[in-house]
Amino acid sequence: MKNIILKYGIPILAIVVIIIHLFFVNIHNLNKWKGGGYGMYSEMHYYYNQIYIPDMSVDSLVTDNDMKNSLGFLMLMPNKNNLKRSAELVLKSTKKDSIHMQIWRPIVNSKNGVYSRELVNEIYLKNQEE
């Protein structure tokens, strides 16, 4: 029994972990650096993702742990749910009537050495309490 577990169980477990990681990377936009790190050196670290809100400094918004956690998680997994949750929190804390929020990912073209950014996701949200 022990030989069967070692021979088949451990490789099957490793394959399941890889499949789960690839699912979250491709479907839920999990950063490749997290969840096992498969493919982590195929893109820049999520720390360099940039949250952009026109006419607002994102650094000035990080005043409490809720905002810090929400924006940090958004940089890690910039999917629609996390973007909407963060935008609602920013909208609530700034007391504005609407907000346009974007998250950008850095791209480096190794063939010609050009550094640029690509838009990962964006949301335009209006305050519902009017």
Image (tube, rainbow, N blue to C red):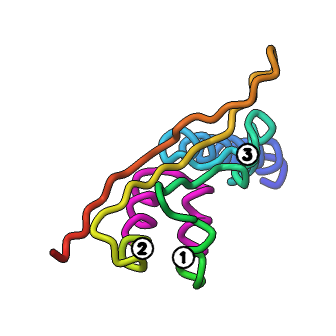
Query: Magenta part of the protein: which range?
Result: 67-88
| Residue 106, image quadrant | top right
Residue at point 76%, 33% (across, down): 42
Measure the alpha-carbon separation of dots 3 and 2: 38 Å
Q: Earlier in the sequence, mark 1 or mark 2?
A: 1
- The local secondary structure at tag 2 comes to helix
Q: Nearer the viewer, residue 118 or 70?
A: 118
- The local secondary structure at tag 1 comes to helix
- The local secondary structure at tag 3 comes to helix
Q: Earlier in the sequence, mark 3 or mark 2?
A: 3
Q: Nearer the viewer, residue 112 or 95?
A: 95
Residue lying farthest to the top in this orientation: 111
Q: Is residue 2 left or right of residue 73?
A: right
Residue at point 57%, 65% (across, down): 57
Asked if residue 14 is among those painted magenta in the image, a careful observer would answer: no
Q: Nearer the viewer, residue 16 or 66?
A: 66
Q: Is residue 24 above or below residue 68?
A: above
Residue lying farthest to the left in this orientation: 130
Residue at point 60%, 76% (across, down): 62
Residue at point 36%, 61% (across, down): 99
Near mark 2 (Cα within 10 A), the count class, few <14, some 14-19 or many ≥20, is some
Marks 1 & 2, CB-CB < 8 Å contact:
yes
Numbered tag placed on residue 89 in the rendering: 2
Numbered tag placed on residue 14 in the rendering: 3
Q: The residue under label 3 is which amino acid type?
A: Ala
Q: The residue under label 2 is which amino acid type?
A: Leu
Measure the alpha-carbon separation of dots 1 and 3: 35 Å
Residue 19 locus on image (x, y percent)? 61, 41
Q: Which residue is mark 1?
A: 67
